[in-house]
Image (cartoon, rainbow, N blue to C red):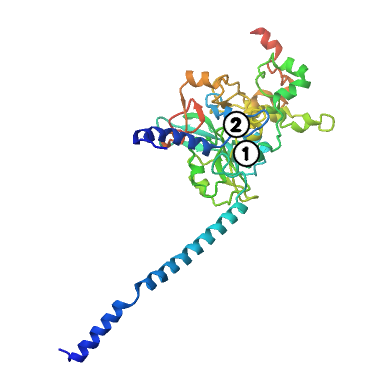
Amino acid sequence: MGSPDVIASGLQEIRRAKLRPSATMAFKNVAHLFRIALAFAIGFAIFLVVRELLVPKSFGRYGHYRGDALNEIASRPISYAGHEVCETCHADVLDVKKRGRHARVACESCHGPLANHAQDPASVVPAKLDTAVLCVRCHEANHSKPMDFPQVHSADHSAGLPCNTCHQPHTPRIEAEAKKK
Amino acid sequence: MSMTRRQLLILLPAAAVAWEHVLAGTPENAPNYKTTEHWWGMLLDITKCIGCGSCVRACQLENHVPDGYFRTWVERYVVRDWGFEHVHVDSPDGGKNGFPNLGNEGKSFFVPKLCNHCADSPCTQVCPVGATFVSPDGVVLVDPKYCLGCRYCVQACPYGCRFINPGTNTAEKCSLCYHRITKDLTTACCEACPTGARQLADLKNPADPVHEFLKTHSVQVLKPHLATGAKAFYNGLDGSVR
């Protein structure tokens, strides 16, 4: 139990607190929020500017990637010219080849990539091929190869002689044997 | 403008389709090649593959793939008796120089492998920067200027088709010779394959013989249970192949 004086001063205290203008409080809060909003807006604007500067123009043209990458990848240089290009000049070889069993083997499958030769036939001359190395890549006997694929045990078959001693690579079947069958 | 709830609900799907169209963007204006007219894949005939390694050599020469790394490679499977779970698989130097003879035991065949150019590819989903993507014509490509070399995609590919190029430290993979197929040429591996075991396939071109082949053969993709939308179709695929 307090004295009446204490109670009176307590009541005064309460009254003063109630009388404190609440409008000032509200204004203070709004100012605070406004500063945060302003800081956020400036930050977002900076983000937009930086993003505009850093992200390539073509990003997002087709999807979530740089659209220009498509053309960059498509414009890389080629090494293999393609057999249609070979056939424009070497029609004589094509005439021989299409009669034989290698008709569907593309030129560069054996001769290697020759786009440079197609571009500049005079100065880029294809290397001569060694049939002893070349033919066995495909035709050396191996259990894993399809049964119907022509295979030989090269050591027994040719006794070390290069294949083109008997076979012509463009028409590999030996004519005399072909006639017998 | 007033609109009933019913009208709004009818309009929503149309708006969604329109938004898809906006997101997809407009196709590029290349003079002869239109990305929207193609959807690329490959047909691989295991019954024709002789394991000569021509495709592997051609790929390395065409795309300057560093030694010991492969955008395409050939695996040899040996299955003894019914041992589907205990197959012998080897690929010496990616099959680049052919395969030594192992003897005549068991069933054996070659499986050429490359990127499956998945329509829903796991590798593009994990790229954090948009450096790898499925092009509008269905080829999974890497943008080397954007790649960070984080290796996320290398881990994500269920077919093991990606590697980090030690020279550039960026992810690399089969591009399906995008620089060739956009010029009306076939890929280097298909050009070099002597038996026609590999054939580039344009699934949007009705004149492509692939459609007739797919209709008349039992064809399978690798790991179909992963639903990656793989577009490397294998003819004569044995159940032991992983």
| Image quarter of residue A156 | top right
Q: Position of residue B237 (x, y in %)?
A: 47, 28
Query: Can the viewer see residue A96?
Result: yes
Q: Amino acid at mark 2?
A: Thr
Q: Secondary structure at mark 2?
A: helix
Residue at the extreme top: A180
The lab-note entry on whether marks 2 and 1 share a chain reads no
Residue in front for this viewpoint, B133 or B94: B133
Which of the chains bears the disc numbered 1? Answer: A
The residue where tag 1 is placed is A70
Which of the chains bears the disc numbered 2? Answer: B
Residue A4, placed above or below residue A147: below
Q: Position of residue B74 (x, y in %)?
A: 56, 34
- Count every numbered label the image shows and give the total: 2
The residues tagged by marks 2 and 1 sit, at their Cα atoms, a distance apart of 10 Å
Residue in front for this viewpoint, A69 or B225: A69
- Is B42 left, or right, of B83 in this rendering? right
Residue B106, placed above or below residue A9: above
**Quarter placement of the N terminus of chain B:** top left
Residue drawn at x 84%, y 33% as measured from the top left: A123
| Image quarter of residue A161 | top right
Q: Which mark is residue B35?
A: 2
Residue drawn at x 52%, y 24% as measured from the top left: B47
Residue in front for this viewpoint, B235 or A37: A37
Local crowd at mark 2 within 10 Å, few (<14), some, or many (≥20)?
A: some
Q: Amino acid at mark 1?
A: Leu
User: Residues at badges 2 and 1 in contact (C-beta under 8 Å)?
Assistant: yes
- Is B81 left, or right, of A121 in this rendering? left
Q: Secondary structure at mark 1?
A: helix
Residue in front for this viewpoint, B14 or A22: A22
Residue drawn at x 50%, y 29% as measured from the top left: B108
Residue at the extreme left: A1
